[in-house]
Every structure is written in structure tokens, then in C-alpha cells.
Image (cartoon, helix red, strand yellow):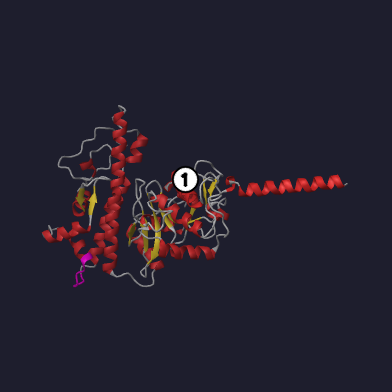
Amino acid sequence: MILKGLKIKYLSRVLLLLVLLSLSSPSMAVVWRATNTWDNVWEKRYQHWVENNWTEDFFMDPKKPIYYKYAHDCSDAVYAMRLIFSYENKLPFVVKNPAKRGRTFSNGKTKWDKYPEHVRVGKFLDFIANYTSTRSLGNDTFPVALDDIKPGDVYVAPDVHSYQIVNITDTGIAEVVSSTTPRAPRFLVRIPSFPFYVPEDLKGKSDGYRRFIQPQNIRKSIKAQPGYNDEQFKIAKAVNYDYVKFTDIISSALGKRIEQPDEKTLRLLIAMCKYANDRSVYVYDALWHLQKIRKKGRKCMTRAEYNNYSTPSRDRRLKAFFAAVKNHHEKNQKFKHWTQPQRWAKALFSVKEPRAKEVEDLNSFCQVQMSFGSEYYIPLRELRRNLSAGKVISDPHAPLEYRWGAQLSPYKPVCKTY
């Protein structure tokens, strides 16, 4: 019996030693250990943190060495916002693995166990960025009611762009911050305006104003998420996807006071400028893809490629956007006191050629980059006239000047259009 007791004590000590060794082993080094759990209180803290800390220089501040010069694009910045707050407050971070259904990525990952914690966090940020996109954001977020939009929520336009909502103004404007492509260390861009898109996915699975799914609910369906609401898609359809009407509804739902006419004029002009400049990414992608296939000996795009890179619906929306802003401007011309936004609108929409100084002021406010990464611009007034004249070409085979209507001769397609 004594011998048996000694064996039990020996085995117990061996097991205890193995447990202690396993706990101290680098293989147990997760990215960070979560000691808190997401709930409504933490969501409110998150909203406050985003509103006060998610600034344009977040990734360019040497006082934040873990994140300093982190290379990001638009979707990377969205995921990073949630991930960083989770890390700094020891909350779990869990998103779906876009490549493997039913699998997830989390802060419990031990891939970088040989590194200290601050390095593990940096590598986790890069890892999430490499696997996720604006397309995967739809799986990790759910749509919310328009009168429930908060800082920390996001806007997703799959395969196009994404925004982080950082503030709700007194007039009910959801101000946004965003990054862009390609992935690089850069300052974020803050815009005192709504995202420049209207949600179109009636099933609510991919686009629109959305909120991150809490980790404990990650395996529930989108519709089963607490706070899920698909009204924005129905409202967007009811206003025929009119950006001005749609954002008027949001500002009315969120605002503490009515937006003044000149405030609205400025907001719409900013939105129009940014929306027109977003088109340059599409044009660049089409030209780059065309160059790539022609290097391989193929002259024209397939039907699928053409549909992916052409811009007919975007160009129709841009034309309608100009018309809606012009309509707002004309309604408010009765005001005797001309503000700077009204002067810009006057120069943009006047039938008669504006004075040189008015054109110069408008061009200082906004010109449209014709191709991403280039210094080739077209004035906003010229783009408006080109759209009205039907000169802007949606065909992805068209040369750069034709894509923006900046050509003198009519466009003659060299490839089949679809």
C-alpha cells in the first residue's frame, strides 16, 4: 500500500509538472487572452472609442508603435478598427473564415507563438487583412435600422468600398472615415458626409449600413442577430435608389435639428466629388485588366469580364446624382446671401459659362481624377456636361479619355459589347 501511495504521488507530481510546462510553453501563446465579454455596455464603450480615437492619423502616429505605418486598404481599416479595440480591452475578436464555411479566425490563434504579444497583434492584423475583403464584411456584420446607426458601424459596398462611421452630427449626418487601394501605410480620410452609396441587396446579406456580429453570435444567421433590421433596403427601393432622398430620410431619423440649405449643399457637393472620384478606381481596374489580357494575346474581354468592368449603372447613378444636386440648388437660389457652397453649385450648374474666378474656385474645391494613381484630372463641371451629352463611355474597352467623355470624336467600339 505504501508503494502504491508513492506511485500515485509520483504520477501526480509528473502530471502537475507537465501541466505547468504546457502552460508556460510558447505553443500556448495566443494573440491575446480575452478576459472580457462583448455586451451592450462594451458596444457603447466601443462607440465612444471610435468617436474619440479613430482619427485620420491612427496608423501614422509613432506614439502607437504596434499600429504605426500599418499597411491597409478600405476593408482592412474596417476590420482593424474592431480588432484593435478588442485587443486593447481584452475582448474576443472572431470573424468567419471566408475560404472555409463554418470555420473562424480569432484572437485565440497560436500561429505566432514564438513572438512577443505586440508582434503577434501586428501579424494578426496582417493575417486578417490578407484573408478578408469588402465581400467578406457582409458575413461578419448585419444590417441595422437607419435610426440606430452609431459610431463604430460600417457601410459596405461589396467589391467596391467600405467606410467606418465615426460621428453622427446634430443634423443627423453619419460622418465617415475610410482608406483606399492599394494596401499601403497612409492617413485615413475623414469626410463630413454620408457614404456615397445606397444599399441595393434586398436580402440584406452584403451591403448597406451594418454592425459587427458579437463573437458569441458568430454562428447565428444574419437575420438572427440582435438588432438586425432590413428596413434600409426597402426604403432605398421605395425612393428608387435616389441618394439625396435616401440620405434625407437618414438625417431626418438621426438629426437633432434640421439641416440648413447651405449645409446640405456642401454635403451633397462633397459627396458628388467623392463619388465621381471613386469611378476612377473602376476605370483603372478595367484598363489594367485589359492591358493584362492583351499581353497574353487576347484583344477583347469575355461577357463575364465585360460585366465586371463596365460601369453603366454607376454612370446612370452619377448622372442622376448631378440632377438631384442641381434640383436642390435651384430650390435654394432664392436666398439673397450667397455662401461659398452656393457659389460652387452656381458655377457647376449654370447654363452660361461662369466667370474665370468662379471656375477657378470650383476647380480648387473639386476636380475628378481620371485614372487612379495618376495626376490626370477632369473638372467637375466638364464631367457634368459630358454626362448630360452622353459622351461618358461605360465600355471597359474604351480608351481613358472616352471613359470620361473627354474626346472630340464619337466612340467606335472595337470589341463586342454586352
Horizontal side of 168 relative to 230 (left or right) equals left
Residue nearer the viewer, 264 or 153: 153
Residue 386: percent from left, percent from top: 20, 49
User: Which residue bears the numbered disc 1?
Assistant: 127
| Residue occupying the point 19% across, 59% down | 362
In the picture, which quadrant includes the C terminus?
top left
Residue 142: percent from left, percent from top: 49, 55
* Image: magenta residue range: 334-341
Q: Is residue 149 visible?
A: no
Horizontal side of 390 relative to 196 (left or right) equals left
- Secondary structure mainly formed by the magenta segment: loop
Horizontal side of 22 relative to 302 (left or right) equals right
Question: Which residue occupies the extreme right position in the image?
Answer: 1
Q: Is 18 colored magenta in this rendering? A: no
Residue nearer the viewer, 221 or 154: 154
Callout 1: SS: helix
| Residue occupying the point 86% across, 47% down | 2
